[in-house]
Image: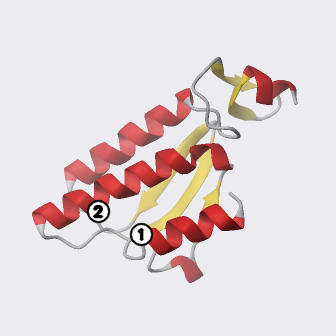
Amino acid sequence: MNKKNTEYLFNKYKDIFADKDNMSFFECDDGWLSLIDCLCNLIMCHCNNEKINPPLAIQVKEKLGGLRFYINNCQDTTIYNYIMFAEEMSFHICEICGTTNNVSTLDKGRITTLCDKCRTN
């Protein structure tokens, strides 16, 4: 993810990314920015409503064509359900441009989730 989008997420969700200096973040392209933003927003709203501390993200990346959002020491099943949903949705969103049109996950030496246009560029 580019630096501008990375800083946007770090600044908007300081509690989730409080340990950003010690971990690997956003090892994915910018097409998933809205998905990650939505996920973090859901987590923060849930934590505020339940009056619980948000989990610390320890890594956010692409793996085997899908989003992976790793957190530490969280026992809240709602938060894990949000994460599982976002990870599943990533297989329907182009990792590069963010479109949901003509998206497929293919293995051509590396498994990626891209739209037809980004796959040919």
Viewer-closest of 1 and 109:
1
Q: Which residue is mark 1?
A: 13
Viewer-closest of 7 and 79:
7
Residue 6 placement (x, y as % from top left) = 61, 65
CA distance for labels 2 and 1? 8 Å
Report if the CB atoms under discs 2 and 1 are less than 8 Å apart. yes
Q: Farthest residue toward the top?
A: 102
Mark 2 belongs to which amino acid?
Met
| Left or right: residue 83 compared with residue 5 | left
Helix, strand or loop at label 1? It is loop
On screen, residue 50 above or below 106: below
Q: Farthest residue toward the right?
A: 121
Name the mark on residue 67: none
How many C-alpha atoms fall within 10 Å of the one at disc 1: few (<14), some, or many (≥20)? some
Viewer-closest of 92 and 64:
92
Name the mark on residue 44: 2
Residue 45 placement (x, y as % from top left) = 24, 59
On screen, residue 42 above or below 120: below
| Left or right: residue 54 compared with residue 37 | left
| Left or right: residue 40 compared with residue 81 | right
Residue 7 placement (x, y as % from top left) = 59, 71
Helix, strand or loop at label 2? It is helix
Q: Quadrant of the C terminus?
A: top right
| Left or right: residue 84 compared with residue 65 | left
Hey, which quadrant is residue 71 in on the image?
bottom left
Hey, which quadrant is residue 112 in on the image?
top right
Please tell me which residue is depicted at 39% across the width and 57% down the height of the picture. Answer: 40
Please tell me which residue is depicted at 62% across the width and 61% down the height of the picture. Answer: 5
